[in-house]
Amino acid sequence: MSGVRMRPRKQKAVFGVLVYDTDKSTIVATDSYFDGKNWERNGRNTFLYKTPNGRYFKQFLSRRENENSYIQPLELEEAITLYFQLDEEVRELEDKVGKPREKENWVSFEKAFPNTQLQDA
């Protein structure tokens, strides 16, 4: 499916008493980027979401046989790590392809993680 974009899917998942809903949440980062051939990274995409209540989760999508798409809740530290991993992947592709990412699926760190300060280890 070369050139056909894998878009985020409407999906809900319940973990304990919490419902994670892609329709009610905002995408803050993704590795979806057109590299000249595909939008996916080896038939996969990851979307990092933030809920209206300030919780984070990832939606993993796959076109691969025998591999399921899913939602996974994330702690703040996990969400920050994923944010920077996705950013690094897309920056490498931007450098290679020479085209900036689409801003519709990316927000600044400050907006994605308000009141969060990165610290030296």
Image (cartoon, rainbow, N blue to C red):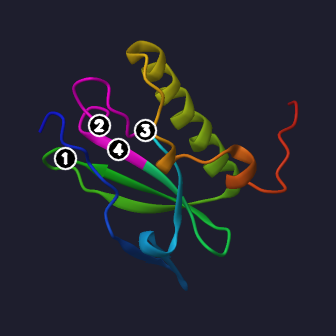
Magenta-colored span? 31-46
Q: The C terminus is located in which quarter?
A: top right
Mark 3 burial class by Cα count in 10 Å: few <14, some 14-19, many 20+:
many
What is the C-alpha distance between the residues marked 2 and 4?
6 Å
Task: Say which residue label 4 marks.
Answer: 45
Dividing the picture into quarters, in which one does residue 69 lie?
bottom left
Q: Nearer the viewer, mark 3 or mark 1?
A: 3
Identity, as a three-letter code, of the amino acid under mark 2: Glu
How far across and down, in percent of the image, does residue 2 sit? 14, 33
Q: Under tag 2, what secondary structure? A: loop
User: Which amino acid lies under the numbered mark 1 shown in the image of this protein?
Assistant: Arg
Which is closer to the viewer, label 1 or label 2?
A: 2
The residue positioned 67% from the left and 45% from the top of the image is: 108
Determine whether the residue tagged by mark 4 lies in a helix, strand or loop: strand
* Label 3, label 2: how far apart the Cα atoms are: 8 Å
Residue identified by numbered label 1: 63
Q: What's the residue at 52%, 24% (across, down)?
A: 91
Please name whichever residue, 14 or 110, is drawn nearer the observer in this view of the structure: 110
- Residue extending furthest toward the bottom: 17
Check if mark 2's residue and mark 4's residue have beta carbons within 8 Å.
Answer: yes
Q: In the rendered image, which residue does mark 3 sit on? A: 31
Q: Residue furthest top?
A: 96
Q: Answer few, some or many: residues within 10 Å of disc 4's Cα (few below 14, many 20 plus, some between 14 and 19).
A: many
- Please name the residue that numbered disc 2 is placed on: 40
Q: Are marks 3 and 4 in contact (CB under 8 Å)?
A: yes
Q: Earlier in the sequence, mark 1 or mark 2?
A: 2
Q: Secondary structure at mark 1?
A: loop
Label 2 neighbour load within 10 Å: few <14, some 14-19, many 20+ = many
Q: Assess whether residue 35 is covered by the magenta stretch.
A: yes
Q: Report whether 51 appears left or right of 1.
A: right
Question: Mark 1 and 2 residues: CB-CB less than 8 Å, in contact?
Answer: yes
